[in-house]
Amino acid sequence: MNNEILKDLIVSVKDQNLHVLNVVVRKNGNIIAKYDFEEEKPILLYSVSKTFTSIAVGISISEGYLNLTDKIIDFFLRQKRYL
């Protein structure tokens, strides 16, 4: 990892006053660089969670885990034994 590239990115984000919370660089599944612009704290996601949910549902449908005719309650009833 070229540290100068990461340093330039950090300076650029700060200079432009962008709302970036942190940067994480991974290689082969391992974190090789990380920079926090702010102290880590819980973030309210609200409607963005719908985006991730719809992506997960779309992938599940395309891979055959779900069908458009499935009832969500059926999945919860199957999981009841794990509660």
Image (cartoon, rainbow, N blue to C red):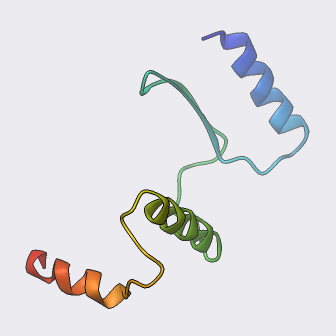
Q: Position of residue 46 (x, y in %)?
A: 61, 76
Q: For this rendering, which residue is in front, 33 or 17?
A: 33
Q: Quadrant of residue 55?
A: bottom right
Q: Is residue 14 left or right of residue 58?
A: right
Q: Residue at x 18, y 78 (%)?
A: 79
In terms of depth relative to the viewer, which is nearer, 58 or 3? 58
Instruction: State the image coordinates of residue 47 (x, y, percent, origin top left).
Output: 65, 76
Q: Quadrant of the C terminus?
A: bottom left
The spot of residue 54 in percent (x, y) is 57, 70
Residue 6 image position (x, y, % from top left) = 70, 21
Question: Farthest residue in the right direction?
Answer: 16
Q: Is residue 51 left or right of residue 74?
A: right
Residue at 63%, 41% in the rendered image: 22
Rendered image quadrant of residue 71: bottom left
Q: Looking at the picture, tell me which residue is in the foreground, 21 or 51.
A: 51
The structure residue drawn at horizontal position 87% and vertical position 45%, both measured from the top left corner, is 17
